[in-house]
Image (cartoon, rainbow, N blue to C red):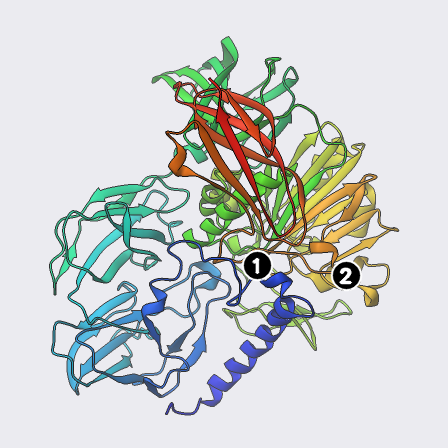
Amino acid sequence: MMKPYSERQKTWRALAALAMTACLFLITGPGAAQDGLRGEDSHLPLRPGKAEYWDTVISVIDNDVARIEGEWEEHIFRRSFPARQHLHTDEDGAVVEGQFDAAGLALVLETHRPYVYTGNLNNGLLEIAINDEVTQVIQPFTEANEIVLYRGLDPEPRDVRVRHLHAPDGGRGARVIGFRELNEPSADLAFFLTGEAGDLLVDARVTVLDGDDAVRSIVQRNWMSGMIRLAGLPPGEGYTLRVEALGWETVTVPLPPLHANSERLLTPIHLPLDNELLTHGFEQPRLGYPAVRRPGDSLELRFAPHGHEEAIELLAVRWEQTVGDARRSVRLWEGEEAIPPNGQRMDIELPDKPLDGMGDLVADVRGPGGVRTWRAPRSLRLREAFPDQPVFLVLGHLDTWGHYQGEYLAVFAEMANLIDPDAVLISNEVHPAYTAGGLKGLRAPHLVTIGNHSFGYEENPSFLDADGERRPGPPFPLSLSLGEVEQGYAHREPHYAWRDSANRLFDRWYGDPMGAAEISPDIAILNYGWSWEPEYNQEAIDAARDLFEPYRDSRIRVLNAYESEPPREFLDHFDFALVHSAHAWPRARDMHADDPGEVRGHHFSIDDGATTFIGKRTSDTFWVVRFADDRVESMTYAGHDEHPWPLDRHRVAPLRVEFDEDSTESTVHRAELINDYSESFDGCRIDWVLPQGRYEVSGGAVDHYWDSDDGEWTVLTVRADAPANAVHTLEAERIR
């Protein structure tokens, strides 16, 4: 039996219970099952590679195999997927032990989470004893997530003790998830993973392939040391290693033979950044602040200042569109234009021919080093007509700190492409590289706010009571969210200069955390990534007002901000139709709702529906915001009063298209448009990449098509309705 918890541990468990109760109410409140689309009982399949490894782990929590001595606390990093529930200790001599009769055993550790989710560092020691004989001492601070304790022995009961010790330099702390039994002959693969902009590289998906079959696929890496180890692989040769981190280039290398009962240590692997996600030379439009135009419209280009004393010569500008394996390049302008050191603005006329979709702006320039290219990724959306009443997909506080979360955004992007919104608004996103990588396939404009998790906080955050009085809060770091408590809202107020260098990494991908974008000549969005506290950020508030003043006469104005309580005067001045945010929801309600006591859920309207506030509900939901008569008409799922749309972090998207990949050599190609939601979607957009040719489509209507520059592919844009809880079949038959 496990030893009773200490008083300190009980305090932590009480705090965790308070937070989890609030979170679980949000997730599992009245009617929140939402057609069984989320959670363990979901009928949707898990995304590939998301569960197989963890099915083999014996948890140290709520398991009779493990016994503990000393102070251990149950913990899970706050929404930092795919973090696991684990035991954490700082106590010298605290023990986790158990008896195993396997031929081999691996210890599974939780390592570190970056920035505000790190909590106490794991820089103590772990002494391993087998049948009371000390066999090794592990340093979790530098080790990988799993370490083999023994293997290749005869199966018989063995007592295994893991004892935490303070390091000689005073280091302390360890986090234990559980154990894996290794009953078959096995080998280990280990290496150090580094990357360009390495301070941002948290983890990666590491896959060992035997031909096309995945032997092991898992997201792993000790963020502090870069160490990765895949323990318990089947011995063999001819394997391939693939390392993927969204925002970086994927690296694939052949593996040397893996021998039983041994570890293969590779030379370090380095991931370059994905340059197709980085803006070079352009100031606007750019990733995060795209332009939306029709063919034949005028487009203003702003080239950023450069470091050369003499002007750089602009030679050509083109639009590059990529869908799957198909790519085309369209020349927009060519000539000779000097770009001085302080930058340049110029207008170009877009070609008046059928062009549709999201693409990159690419410029050829000649400088002291010769001819090179500048790029603005996902910066120009061409469309046949502008929306009269827009549709937005909005997400808040996604906690995208690593590759696994980036994969979630990639799944969302595939679904968003089908819905085809006019824009995607993300509030309080926190990691620019994984976010940009996850949304690389998104073919709709998107805006992202930097959010407080990119700043850090004062050491002791403060409470703001309902009457507006500030008082000291609990010590920080605190790796769980207290939410709304009896004495007020636990509000962590970041202390920083609003133009502090804290945003420099965000700027490399998404530009200034404050900016404006239009999705039509009369629909404008203000992106505001700073706090609304005048004490710290009055300069930022004033700058936002000046920035958005030219858009004040737009027919529909939208605010995308990480905090939800702009001053009422600011709201009234711009008369926003939609305010989307992720934070401090009770404060926003109390500040702005006409009758706070009547507010339910995480949305409300003021001024008789003229302005609608939408806030974060959970980190695995989103809102579909539809307008009518220039104001928000609906946003909830299936007509519910409060519930947003569910999108499980670990399962396939409820709205998806599955192509028949086995028909590539056939003249008839099939696809299934699958909708597991209880609400239909009309006019879904399916971008179908097929061998080059001309096609007739049944089950949908062809909007337009284009051929790739290499002559291998034709991209059909097909419109089809997705009825609720149904599978709709489409066929494309090649006619020439």
* Viewer-nearest residue: 559 or 504: 559
Task: Please tell me which residue lies in front, 234 or 413.
Answer: 234
Q: Image quarter for residue 593?
A: bottom right
- Mark 2 lies on residue: 589
Where residue 697 sits in the image (x, y, percent)?
Answer: 56, 28
Question: Of 259 and 557, which appears nearest the observer?
Answer: 259
Q: With respect to residue 62, does 640 lie above or below?
A: above
The type of residue carrying mark 1 is: Ser
As drawn, is 145 to the left or to the right of 378? left
- Which residue: 53% across, 27% down? 716
> Can you see residue 444?
no
The crowd level at tag 1 (other Cα within 10 Å; few <14, some 14-19, many 20+) is some
Mark 2: amino acid: Arg
Locate residue 695, reporting x and y percent.
Answer: 51, 23
Please name the residue shown 66% across and 54% down the image. Answer: 678
The residue tagged 1 is 619
**Residue 1: image location, x then y, percent:** 37, 92
Q: Secondary structure at mark 1?
A: loop
Indicate whether 603 appears above or below 283. Answer: below
* 148 displayed left or right of 640: left
Image position, residue 668 (x, y; %)? 46, 30
Residue 495, picture quadrant: bottom right
| For residue 283, side relative to residue 433 (left or right) | right
Q: Is residue 438 visible?
A: yes
